[in-house]
Structure formats: C-alpha cells, structure tokens
Image: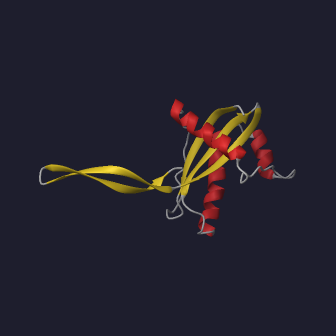
Amino acid sequence: MEVKINQVVLHLLDPGASEPVLSDRAMDMDADLYEYYTATLERAFASDEVKNCRFLPDSAFAAEMAHNNDFVDISRRIAGVIFEQMLQYQAIPAGDLAVVDFTADGVPFYGVLKLNYRPGYTHHTENVDGAPVNSIIQQRACLP
C-alpha cells in the first residue's frame, strides 16, 4: 500500500478539561512524524478493527465538506463533535485526535485517528546532596 500524507492537524482531547485544545494550522511534518503517521495509517488499514465510513447521501456535513476547502476548519469541527461525545460518555479515554488528509494507492481519504494516551517511562535525574541520582518516572500521556 502506498500512503501519501498531504497534511495532519492534531487536536488535544481531554474530557477532564473544560474544552479541547484545537490547532489552528496543520503540523509541520519532519521525516520521523511522516513515518509515524504513515505506519499508523497502514496498520489501521490492515486491522480488523478499522472503521471505514461513508456519509449518508443526505448528510449536511458531507455536502459542506465537498464545498469547504479549509481542512483545518473541518478538522476542528470533527474534534469538537468527538469532544462532545467524550464529555457525554466518560468511558472514552483522553487522547489526541489526528485528522489526516492523505491518499492510499491514489485514492483520497480523510483519516480520523484517536490516539489514546498510554503510560510510558523515562529517566529522571535529580541532585541529592550535591550528587546526581538517576531514577525512572512514569509519564501518563505518551502517545501510541
């Protein structure tokens, strides 16, 4: 599968906050981020859990998307709807939402990727009595 990413907008969705943190522009993509999102999309297409969606023929949102060339605005609206659902259904975990404009084998897609946080570990160094002491601490908001 050949994936070509055109742009990614990342939004932060934490139902513990009063509102989401919505981006006003697409991410700057370096080679590592491009590879991360490409691999994530390829895994999504290969997964049995992938959700392929199409709009109903009378969908007002689909009609607006067809005439709205502002991808950032569309991504913000999608994030807002998902955040409202997260507030209503407390079992939905906090995470980031990546809205991706891409092609797969030449076919255009919008990807909506909910990236749930997971715990991770990193080192921590502190100075105790003038000497460095290293330890491991847990980070609770690492992305998959």
Pinpoint residue 58: horizontal percent, then vertical percent.
86, 52
Q: Tell me if 49 is positioned left or right of 123 in this view.
A: right
Q: Is residue 15 above or below residue 57?
A: below
Q: Is residue 63 above or below residue 119?
A: above
What residue sits 54% from the left and 55% below the top?
A: 95
Pinpoint residue 100: horizontal percent, then vertical percent.
65, 41
Q: Is residue 26 visible?
A: no
What residue sits 73% from the left and 39% below the top?
A: 109
Number of marks drawn:
0
Q: Is residue 71 visible?
A: yes
Residue sticking out furthest to the right: 57
Q: Tell me if 32 is positioned left or right of 98 in this view.
A: left
**Where the N terminus falls, by quadrant?**
top right
- In depth, the one of 42 and 27 nearer the eye is 42
Pinpoint residue 2: horizontal percent, then vertical percent.
70, 31
- In depth, the one of 105 and 94 nearer the eye is 105
What residue sits 87% from the left and 50% below the top?
A: 57
Q: How is the image coloured?
A: secondary structure
What residue sits 80% from the left and 46% below the top?
A: 63
- In depth, the one of 32 and 63 nearer the eye is 32
Q: Is residue 123 above or below residue 18?
A: above
Pinpoint residue 50: horizontal percent, then vertical percent.
72, 51
Residue sticking out furthest to the left: 129
